[in-house]
Image: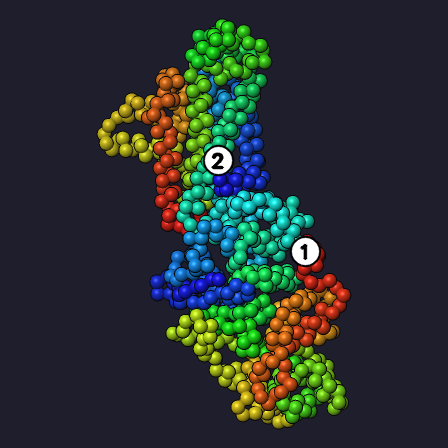
Amino acid sequence: MRVLAYELRRLRGLRSTWLLLAAVLVGDAAVAAVLASQTPSGPLAAPAGVRLLTAAVPLIPLPFAALGTGVLGALSYGHEVRHPGLPASQVAYPRRVRLLLAKLLVVGPVAALLALATLLLDTVAVHLALPAGVTVAARAEPGALSARVSEALGGAGLSGLDDLPGAFAPVALVAGHGVPAALLAFVLLTVVAAWTGVLTASLTRSAAAGVLLLCALPPLLESGVALLLRRTGRPWPGRAAELLPFQSGIEWAYGWVYGGTRGAAAGGAALTDPALLAAVAAPAALLLLAALLVQARRRAL
Amino acid sequence: MIQSTGLTKVYRKGAPPAVLDLTFDVRPGMVTALLGAEEAGKTTALRLMLELERGQGVTLFGGRTYRRLRRPEREVGVLLPGPGEGAVAVAGHPGRTARGHLRMLAAAVGVPARRADELLEQTRLAAVAGQRLRTFSPGMHRRLALAAALLGDPSTLLLDAPTEGLSPRNVEWFHSFLRSFAVAGGTVLATTRTPQEAAQLADRVITLDRGRLVADQPVTEFRRTRLSPEVAVRGPQMARLADLLVSQGAEVRRDGSVGLAVAGLDRTEIGELAYRNGILLHELADRVVEQPVPRAALPVASGRSGHLRVQHAAPSKEQSGEQPEEQPGQPSEEPRREPGRPSAPALPVVPVAAVGGARALLGATPRREEPAAPAVGVERLFRDGPGERPHPVRSGAVGRRTSAADLLTDDTVRLSRPARPALPTTPDDHRSE
């Protein structure tokens, strides 16, 4: 409990935390708006809508928000290394483990909140920036709505989003078929990225090295698994390819969420699939194990 | 009560040990100083005590090792220099405010945030509590680190070079704080590099040399064996004065071309003697001569007894280097050393005005006294005053010779006579430092 209070105060008391969060929010919204303004006219499909909402730029290996929370996590550990508050009280192993877990516990919800905030902001930004010729599919035809959303709407006595007042127009962006699940996966990815940031910084004892490792992780994982599969002579199993389409780092990040036929497959049902959850959580879990093992050999965080 | 037994640390295989079989006790109610030159192993010893370093030896804090303490911050306050060397060591992240930093650590220790504000008051940082740490001076950083160490209200303090690189005023504040902490029953262990500071701060001085314990002595004994007072005299008629001084039983040696270094006579007595005999003086000043460190000799006995066989360095080296300077053409100036009397080694001389610690310890001549000179807390001066009166003199022939302790009492009381509110306990701001 005390370590949690400490970690919360530590995170709150730093200006860099707030600057980083603000930068992620603003940058995300700006990228989303720019992308939206360049959309060709015509109906906007759900995968394209998700790409706009998460401000996906193929240049960086992770989405903006995930990268931001990863940096936040790495900094939260890096600060502890560079400016240990009471270094002597971290000598005992249980105390160090407790502090590490407290960091994960604090940075996880922060990451989730940040992801939700970026989605909210991006929805508004995309709605405002979409050119006049673009029509959102989910708003135009009730058939493109996600099953749950149309169920909820039916319960409220409405036939489609068009019946809602004009102020609810941006909701159409997040209500397309498969989109809520994809956005939930995005939030999950952001949290995992934050944890990975903490753990990579813990392994390298440096915030900068931790962030670099975090950025390098998607391509490394991708090529590593591809190599492994080629060695064993087996083709990509259909399920794994569906879940983790390691075509490139960006696709590892959220390729399975949208794009082509896989977008539909990864909706709704796939998200609760334990295999998928395991695949997303595996890197973080492995890193946590490694960090705990490494801590046992150390005298300081 | 801290009991350290057999602390040993070897950094590389084959390298000389940084600390070798260090055994000592730190008792409550007194300040213990760990004295040693640079690289003597003071910091390593402290880190070994806390198990921040891997090594051999056991340190018990009230019967438990530091690692096994249930609430270590509540029992042992630790001040280690932060990242950065010496004076540039910082207490925390530069972007954080002092209050935020301390409240954060208070949360980690498990004490209310109120305690952090109390400590800011106590360390005279309340006025700057809202400022970011990057604007803080070394002294403010060190005081903030001390406040962090005190958060859990510990009964034991471990400090690594608490006054290194600080202004005389901050040093003074630290000394008075640590003294009062010990007087209230606390246990204090601080490392220091200068014997003057050790003599001023501690009740017990543990001397390290190259990782070995060479002396573990009470401060009175330490002063007697390691520090000796001297009076520097300059003037045109030094030959005559030297004769007179020697006839009075003083110990005289040449100091430059027109100066004398006199041991065994008070400054006032020398002045009187010169006046009565019509000798013109240009300078008359106290200073402290530091005796050479006793070198460690292997094997070292256990320090548990508190008294260790110390091998003194042969003073002949220093003396032989000095002898050729004395000119045979002026035999009257040649100090007549009585047989059987230990002659004061000449090295190294610490000029009074150059070292802050020595200044506070001895006090300069009035004309050297600057307005900014640090004044000494009076309670410190009288603490061991009566106990040291029957101080054993070094030589039976010199009955009137005063010890360093007497000089300290005498001069610093005179120094602190100005109406300046000099006690560190008085509310003065350290913001300018």
The total number of labels drawn is 2
Nearer to the camera, B298 or B385: B385
Type of amino acid at the residue the image marks with label 1:
His
Disc 1 packing (10 Å; few <14; some 14–19; many ≥20): some
At numbered mark 1, what does the secondary structure look like: helix, strand or loop?
A: loop
On residue A107, which mark appears? 2
Q: Chain of mark 2?
A: A
Q: Residue at x 44, y 13 (%)?
A: A148
Where residue B336 appears, as percent x and y from the top left, is 59, 92
Where residue B247 appears, as percent x and y from the top left, is 65, 92
Type of amino acid at the residue the image marks with label 2:
Val
Where residue A195 appears, as percent x and y from the top left, is 43, 35
Location of residue B240 (image quadrant): bottom right
- Which quadrant holds the C terminus of chain B? bottom right
On residue A159, which mark appears? none
Mark 1 = which residue?
B430
Location of residue A220 (image quadrant): top left
What colouring style does the render use? rainbow
